[in-house]
Amino acid sequence: MGSLQLEDFAAGWIGGAASVIVGHPLDTVKTRLQAGVGYGNTLSCIRMVYRRESVFGFFKGMSFPLASIAVYNSMVFGVFSNTQRFLSQHRCGEPEASPPRTLSDLLLASIVAGVVSVGLGGPVDLIKIRLQMQTQPFRDANLGLKSKAVAPGEQPAYQGPVHCITTIVRNEGLAGLYRGASAMLLRDVPGYCLYFIPYVFLSEWITPEACTGPSPCAVWLAGGMAGAISWGTATPMDVVKSRLQADGVYLNKYKGVLDCISQSYQKEGLKPHSWSMVAPGPGLRLSVTTVCLLIKVFFRGITVNAVRGFPMSAAMFLGYELSLQAIRGDHAVTSP
């Protein structure tokens, strides 16, 4: 029922490269905020990275994502587009037609893309985060360790992407490349549902009925808004994923997703004094203080996530749509 369309994969590769170039500096800031220590807020983190590492600090670990995330996005967009097209054609029984897409088709295609993204993107994210974090101070209260960072002149833990991969495989085995994969799965499956579905409906809503397809401006706006929505809502599990993947540069302190959530909550969330603000009565009711502390821990970096999500996704979808248009020789942009 229908054939595999390879141009979706090629267009996804181009869009992926564009998104990495646009979004990596803010991705570095996001990772430092979520998994590092000593950063008060987004602006403080930006100033500190610039002061300590100059402008090049924002591009740490970029070479590996630039080479691999393009392939990763190629697979995600190719799988989503072909899965959605197959489901629509199978539902209508018309292999050559372009039947209208339903929410159920988009939802299932997004879930498949999210699962595929973890298999391909887990090692990519791990290497990127390890390279971003190796100049960052660490602290472990349970072990009583003092904060440590790579001092000027000292050799960092990893010399580059290849050395990082070989070190992880040597020390942790092939499974080490998929550290944090379960958290990434919990982030990406709902994340891609809130990525592709808003994009499709927003681009259709913005586009006038007389037009055959969305304009580049509509693609840019819908893609940016979809990215902000997706990254904003995915922040809690993104925090957990970043901490699990950053864990291991100098020491290992998390046993898994639940242990990471528990330790993060105990150390940075609910403090003993906040129990006095819990309302009396049967059962446990969260106080305003408790909710605020939960937000402080698990929504760390939400501002930079949402801000970064807009230009990254706008570049991703615009690169995808325009390159797909050029490959197919169409005169109108076509949604995935």
Image (cartoon, rainbow, N blue to C red):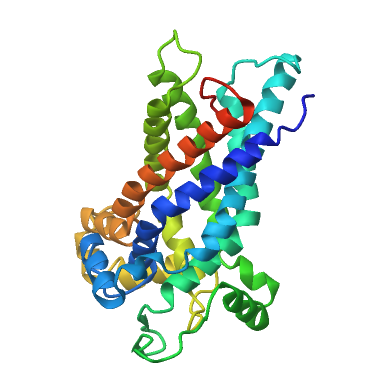
Q: Horizontal and vertical percent for residue 69?
A: 56, 54
- The answer to whether 252 is drawn above or below residue 178 in the figure is below
Residue placed most toward the observer, 100 or 208:
208
Placement of the C terminus among the 4 image quadrants:
top right
Q: Horizontal and vertical percent for residue 200?
A: 49, 27
Placement of the N terminus among the 4 image quadrants:
top right
Which of the 4 quarters of the picture holds residue 88? top right
Residue 181 visible in image = no
Q: In the image as oriented, which residue stretches furthest toward the top?
A: 210
- The answer to whether 19 is drawn above or below residue 130 in the figure is above
Which of the 4 quarters of the picture holds residue 327? top right
Q: Residue drawn 70% across and 14% down?
A: 97
Residue placed most toward the observer, 66 or 134:
66
Number of marks in the rendered image: 0
Q: Residue drawn 65% across and 48% down?
A: 116
Q: Horizontal and vertical percent for residue 289?
A: 22, 58
Which of the 4 quarters of the picture holds residue 215? top left
Residue 30 visible in image = yes
Q: In the image as oriented, which residue stretches furthest toward the right?
A: 1
Q: Is residue 139 left or right of residue 81?
A: left
Q: Horizontal and vertical percent for residue 104?
A: 59, 26
Q: Residue drawn 35% across and 57% down?
A: 26
- The answer to whether 95 is drawn above or below residue 58 in the figure is above
- The answer to whether 278 is drawn above or below residue 105 in the figure is below
